[in-house]
Image: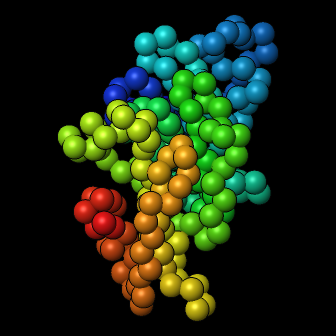
Amino acid sequence: MKLIDFSPCEQYLVTWSNEPIVVPEGAVQGPQYFSPDDEGNNLAVWDIKSGDLLRTFSTYNEGDPPSGKKQMQWPALKWSPDDKYVARITPGQMISVYELPSMYLEGKKSLKIEGVVDFEWCPLGEKDKEASKKTKENSLVYWTPEVQNQPARVTLLSFPSRSIMRQKNLFNVTEVRRRYTVYFESCSEILF
């Protein structure tokens, strides 16, 4: 194991190893063990209380050699502040959000977002925690870069309803990473 990440409420754990999972023939089977379906993956999500393995993923794209020197983004999975969801990005294509503890794809489909570069779950302040108890919604914010005549865009999305709460166009974005950080540090302050 090389990297670990705990969910915000410390109910779940993600582990990553640069070596793909190999399940020996005749290995013990059960919810807390890797199965043949996990073979070749290297990212695992665990339930901390039970010790059960919930799901595994590969962090390698098809065609990439596992020993490639490509820089992996960590954390590879991002948690909603209430531990109800965990999400991962396929850069340029989509954000896949999974319900916990089932690890089923929420709504049975990913958020298809052409050109998406990165995303974050909006943290919950004290005022936000009270509001989210009533609505049972989280907020997800993502950004897409400038492409031809389309400006860069930051979008705040209510989740699981998937309704767009706010969008902001950004023009002549040169320092994307720095601006991205500022936008995601406080979603509601910047976008509203």
The residue nearer to you, when weighing 18 against 114, is 114
Percent position of residue 13, x then y: 44, 28
The furthest residue to the left: 126
Residue 130: tell me if it is visible: yes
Picture layout, residue 88 above or below residue 56: below
Percent position of residue 71, x then y: 52, 59
Picture quadrant where residue 62 is located: bottom right
Picture layout, residue 142 above or below residue 145: above
Q: Quadrant of the C terminus?
A: bottom left
Percent position of residue 165, x then y: 44, 60
Residue drawn where x is 50% and y is 84% of the image: 151
In the visual, does 149 lie left or right of 62? left
Percent position of residue 127, x then y: 22, 43
In the visual, does 70 lie left or right of 40? left
Residue 74: tell me if it is visible: no
The residue nearer to you, when weighing 151 against 77, is 151
